[in-house]
């Protein structure tokens, strides 16, 4: 028999407690400086400004590199980007980046528990289920509701289509039809395709002048499809469209979905957490009737990117879609309070996303988040009041949630000329790089969007942005 007495153990991947502290202490002052600079840092820098050094492929180093050089390079690589963590970032749907969630990641990555099978980490799984339950309570779901943390809203939308498919359809899905509006986030179409449908199986229903899905057109389309031998099965509504924050008529949609026997999903990736506020509850009334809901804690709860969430009204639908046994896994649980996430979600090994929610909520309290969300609602009203006074500024629909879309108008100009003018206006607006707004096309009109959701954005930034809009609009008038 071969003797193996002297197998040398490489050990440099391990950090002793002292080395761990040294590593963190080396990074910490750099991060502190980053946060000191952040309030005045440009809200975006052109991707074209990326240095050749950082835009060309590099090989994996065979030997250890000096840590101070490596950290230095990381910070240098930060600069040519959208500063999504900056207070001036009001583009697209802003994310967050709560420092306490980063501390949560440090804890979970260092301890590296297996948060997918109840047996392997029962108390941590309980913690994650608690976070999901906070969300199901927030949307007004019953006690049978459940859900799980995804990496983002796109994955939650996909998971919802798949769950609906596995619960409502037989093996042959070729006749099935999915419905959404012309304001849908593009992840809805992607979700359908990834769940096995052809894109022609997604019916895009027109929206009204408030950018909400037309329930009448939807209902007519469903009836026409049935008469044509198709199988309507899934509606994806939005509680906060990406373009303008519009909330579809959720109560009417749920009545329609119920009477037609369709699964109703609400993509509330942008707007869902406004359910913490009274104003949000009024706007999202009826959300609790949906069969599933997408939330994005990395938007409305200000978490770092990588934390989305799917909620389902009935936990059994997730089980039906994902339950597969495997002999090599620890025993699975029957008790409703003991979830094995591998039996209710697509993943096995996964990061501890729930801790990113749990830790900040413990350290700051739910009310703090409510206050921040109320502040965002106040800020968009403030922006609306300021810029809508200008005679040439057209607000395209009233502000909805914390977003609004506007454009500059001038009589006598064609739509094409107006679009070009607004494109120039957008370029002028963001040229100072003190803030970033994005733009979109709304039924042929080029519009500029303000979306306020970064937790660091306060009145000073919004006021400056509104002043700039008015200043440039006055220049255009002359
Ligand atoms: C309404 C809506 N749904 C889905 C998504 C996709 O979310 P994620 O970027 O987390 O995948 C977004 C992103 O902005 C969104 O606004």
Image (cartoon, rainbow, N blue to C red):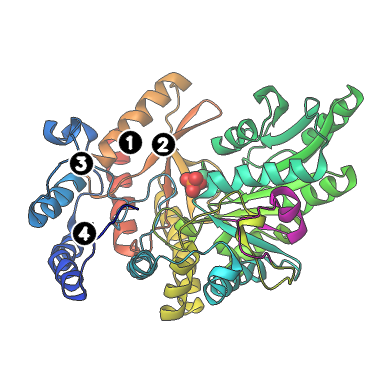
Which is nearer the eye, 367 or 461? 367
Q: Quadrant of residue 139?
A: bottom right
Specify which label sits upstream in the sequence, 1 or 2: 1
Marks 1,2: beta carbons within 8 A? yes
Residue 6 — which label?
4
Q: Quadrant of residue 193?
A: top right
Identified at 73% across, 72% down, the residue is 335
Image location of residue 44, percent across then percent down: 25, 44
330 magenta-colored: yes
Q: CA distance from mark 4 to mark 2?
A: 64 Å
Q: Look at discs 3 and 2 and give the one toward the viewer.
A: 3
Q: Position of residue 45 (x, y in %)?
A: 21, 41
* Mark 1 vs ligand 1: CB below 8 Å: no
Magenta-drawn stretch contains 98:
no
Residue 34 appears at what percent x and percent y? 18, 60
> For mark 3, what is the residue?
80
Callout 2 secondary element: strand
For mark 3, does the 10 Å Cα neighbourhood hold few (<14), some (14 to 19), or many (20 or more) residues?
Answer: some
Q: Earlier in the sequence, mark 3 or mark 2?
A: 3
Give me the residue at 72% from left, 26% from top: 201
- How far apart marks 1 and 2 lie (CA) works out to 8 Å
Query: Alpha-carbon distance for marks 4 and 1?
Result: 68 Å
- Give the label on residue 426, or none: 1
Q: CA distance from mark 1 to mark 3?
A: 20 Å
Residue 304 location in percent, x, y?
A: 39, 58
Magenta region: which residues? 309-332
Disc 2 marks which residue? 439
Position of 355 with respect to 196 (left or right) is: left
């Amino acid at each position: 028999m071969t003797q193996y007495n002297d197998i040398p153990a490489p050990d440099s991947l391990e950090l002793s407690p002292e080395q761990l502290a040294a590593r963190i202490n080396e990074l910490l002052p750099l991060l502190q400086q980053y946060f000191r600079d952040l309030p005045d840092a440009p809200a975006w820098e052109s991707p074209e400004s990326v240095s050749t050094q950082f835009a060309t492929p590099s090989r994996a180093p065979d030997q250890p590199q000096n840590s101070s050089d490596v950290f230095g390079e990381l910070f240098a690589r930060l600069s040519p980007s959208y500063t999504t963590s900056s207070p001036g970032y009001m583009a697209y749907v802003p994310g967050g980046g709560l420092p306490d969630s980063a501390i949560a990641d440090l804890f979970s990555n260092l301890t590296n528990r297996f948060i997918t099978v109840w047996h392997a980490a029962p108390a941590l799984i309980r913690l994650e289920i608690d976070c999901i339950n906070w969300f199901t309570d927030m949307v007004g779901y019953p006690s049978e509701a459940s859900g799980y943390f995804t990496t983002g809203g796109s994955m939650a939308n996909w998971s919802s289509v798949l769950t609906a498919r596995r619960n409502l359809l037989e093996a042959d899905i070729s006749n099935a039809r999915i419905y959404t509006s012309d304001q849908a986030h593009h992840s809805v179409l992607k979700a359908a395709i990834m769940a096995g449908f052809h894109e022609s199986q997604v019916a895009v229903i027109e929206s009204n002048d408030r950018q909400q899905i037309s329930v009448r057109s939807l209902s007519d389309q469903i009836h026409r499809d049935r008469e044509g031998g198709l199988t309507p099965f899934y509606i994806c509504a939005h509680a906060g469209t990406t373009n303008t924050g519009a909330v579809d008529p959720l109560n009417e949609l749920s009545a329609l979905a119920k009477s037609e026997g369709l699964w109703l999903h609400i993509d509330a990736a942008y707007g869902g957490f406004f359910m913490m506020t009274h104003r949000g509850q009024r706007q999202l009334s009826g959300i609790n009737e949906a069969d599933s809901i997408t939330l994005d804690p990395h938007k409305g709860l200000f978490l770092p990117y990588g934390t989305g969430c799917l909620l389902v009204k009935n936990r059994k639908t997730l089980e039906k879609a994902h339950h597969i046994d495997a002999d090599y896994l620890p025993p699975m649980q029957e008790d409703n309070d003991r979830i094995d996430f591998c039996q209710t979600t697509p993943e096995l090994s996964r990061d501890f996303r729930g801790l990113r929610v749990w830790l900040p909520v413990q350290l700051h309290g739910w009310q703090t988040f409510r206050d921040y969300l109320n502040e965002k609602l106040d800020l968009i009203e403030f922006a609306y009041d300021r810029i809508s006074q200008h005679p040439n500024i057209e607000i395209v629909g009233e502000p909805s949630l914390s977003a609004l879309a506007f454009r500059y108008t001038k009589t006598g100009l064609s739509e094409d000329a107006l679009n070009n003018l607004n494109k120039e206006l957008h370029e002028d607006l963001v040229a100072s790089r003190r803030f970033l707004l994005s733009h979109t096309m709304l039924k042929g009109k080029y519009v500029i969007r303000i979306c306020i959701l970064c937790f660091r954005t306060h009145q000073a930034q919004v006021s400056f942005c509104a002043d700039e809009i008015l200043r440039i609009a006055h220049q255009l008038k002359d």
